[in-house]
Image (cartoon, grey):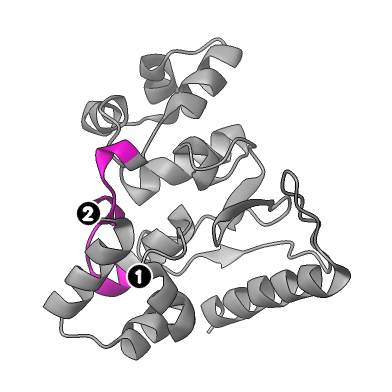
Amino acid sequence: MGVGERIKKVRKQKGLTQVKLAEKAGISRSYLADVESDRYNPSLTTLMDLARALNVTASCFLDDKEIDFRNLIQLCKKNGLSLDSLGELLEISSKELAHIKSNKLPSEGTMFKIIDHFDCTWDYIIGKTDSPDNVVFEENSISASGLIPKRPEKLGDPIELINIPSTIAAHFENMNFTEEETEEISNFINFIASKRKK
C-alpha cells in the first residue's frame, strides 16, 4: 500500500471528502486526488499538513522503507556529532532518537529542531531529496532555498512559509523547464502558501 492509499484510507475512516480534507490541509482537491492515487509523491510538509487535518501522525502514512535518515547521519558526521550527541544538544528524547534510528518519523517538534539546527528541508532529512535546500514537488525535487518552513509557536499551529521568492529556478537532470512552466510552479507554491496564511 502506497502513501496515497494510506491517506485515502484514513480520510475515509474519518468520513471526510477530498474537498473537505484538502480545505483543512490547505492544498487543492485535485492535488490531493493525485496524491491519493499515488501519481504524486507529497513532501513531508504536505504529509504533516494532511496528518494535522486528519488528527493523526504523519508516520502513519509512511512505510519504514520510505524514510531514510542517511542524510541526517551524514550531516551529524560532517559536524562531528553522533545521533546521540545531536539528541543531547537539541534536547531530543531517547524515544524520539529511537524512532530516528529505526527509520520511523519522529514528532513534528523533533523535526523542527533538526531542520532548524542544520538549516535544511524536511524532505532532505528523511531522504526524499539529495540537496539540503530541495523539496519534493510532484515527482521531482526542486530548490526551495528561502522557502524553509517557519516553526509554529506551538505544535498544531499552521506552518507558515517565509521568504517566498518571486521566481523559482527548477532544474532536473535531462529536463529543462520553459519560462511558462517555471511560472506555473511558482504560482502553485504561492497558492499553497496563501492557503496556509488563512
* Above or below for 83 versus 66: above
Quick one: SS at disc 2?
helix
Horizontal and vertical percent position of residue 181: 77, 71
| Residue under numbered circle 1 | 37
Magenta extent: 52-65
At 44% from the left and 65% from the top, the residue drawn is 39
Horizontal and vertical percent position of residue 107: 31, 46
Magenta span contains residue 35? no
At 58% from the left and 75% from the top, the residue drawn is 192
The residue nearer to you, when weighing 183 against 89, is 183
Q: Secondary structure of the magenta portion, mostly?
A: helix
Quick one: SS at disc 1?
loop
The residue nearer to you, when weighing 20 against 152, is 20
Query: How many residues crowd mark 1 within 10 Å: few (<14), some (14–19), many (20+)?
Result: some
Residue 16: which disc?
none
| Residue under numbered circle 2 | 60
The residue nearer to you, when weighing 194 against 137, is 137
In front: label 1 or label 2: 1
* Above or below for 138 versus 143: below
Counting residues from the start of the chain, the first of labels 1 and 2 encountered is 1
